Amino acid sequence: MKKYDRMEEIYESGSVPWDQTDPPPEVIDVAAMIPSGRALDLGCGYGRASIYLASLGWKVDGVDFVPEAVKQARLRAEQAGVSDLVTFHLSPVTKLDYLMGPYDFVLDVGCAHGLQPEELKEYHQELFRLLKPGSLFLLFAHLNEENIDPEEQDWMDESILRTLFSKGFHLEKVNYGQTQVNEQAPWRSAWFWFRKDIV
């Protein structure tokens, strides 16, 4: 529960480092390339990506496990005039049985990297169930440093991610970089473009 408590404290404080008006450029680029349809925003936070997609005509479900994040996301959707197109759900991203696919686009900007390996397996199963074959799953994640002691790993193990999503998906592209929040040391990070296989 350590990471959950930390996230809850950040949202309760009202000082959320990633609280920006627009979603990341990668999301904006994808939205410009594919026709609007149904989208799923996992770990939606205050809903910036969900609200942006809804403003373009997408029908969106946003999911987050922090009550304050979901509360504010709903308020912001109302203020943006898109509450008829976006629904926010208070839920873990590993337990999505209340949702029915298919979705044309699934997005995760910094949620899955907080999951344990067993949770990541559940997450993968839900994505496979919900995403339309041939459609895109766009993931941003903080990555563990290479050759790091397992006891010091805080983020996502890329090899586990790649192995898990080799089942039912193929990786089209990866962009590596670094992410820094406030005064903290930067983390390895990457954007992953996974495409669900067409059987």
Image: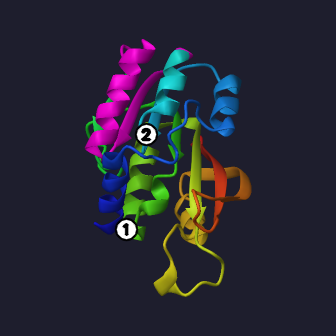
Image quarter (top left, top right, bottom left or bottom right) of the C terminus: top right
Q: Please tell me whether residue 31 is drawn above or below residue 108 in the rendered image.
A: above
Image quadrant assignment for residue 133 = top right
Which three-letter amino acid code belongs to the residue tagged 1? Glu
Q: Which of disc 2 and disc 1 is earlier in sequence?
A: 2
x, y percent for residue 72 = 34, 32
159, 135: nearer the viewer: 159
Residue 132 at x, y = what percent?
51, 34
Crowd around label 1: few <14 · some 14–19 · many ≥20 (10 Å) = few
Q: Which residues are magenta?
A: 56-85
How many residues crowd mark 2 within 10 Å: few (<14), some (14–19), many (20+)?
A: many
Q: What residue appears at the point 44 percent right and 33 percent down from the top-left corner?
A: 47
Q: Is residue 62 magenta?
A: yes
Magenta span contains residue 145: no
Q: Is residue 160 left or right of residue 127?
A: right
Could you tell me which residue is drawn at 44 percent across and 31 percent down? Answer: 102
Q: Which mark, by number, is residue 118?
A: 1
Compared with 37, 116 (above or below) is below
Q: Nearer the viewer, residue 154 or 17?
A: 17
Nearest to viewer (mark 1 / mark 2): 2
In the picture, the disc for residue 44 is 2
Can residue 106 be seen by looking at this rendering? yes
Residue 111, placed above or below residue 46: below
- For label 1, the SS is helix
Can residue 104 be seen here? no
Residue at horizontal 54 percent and vertical 24 percent from the top: 52
Q: How many marks?
A: 2
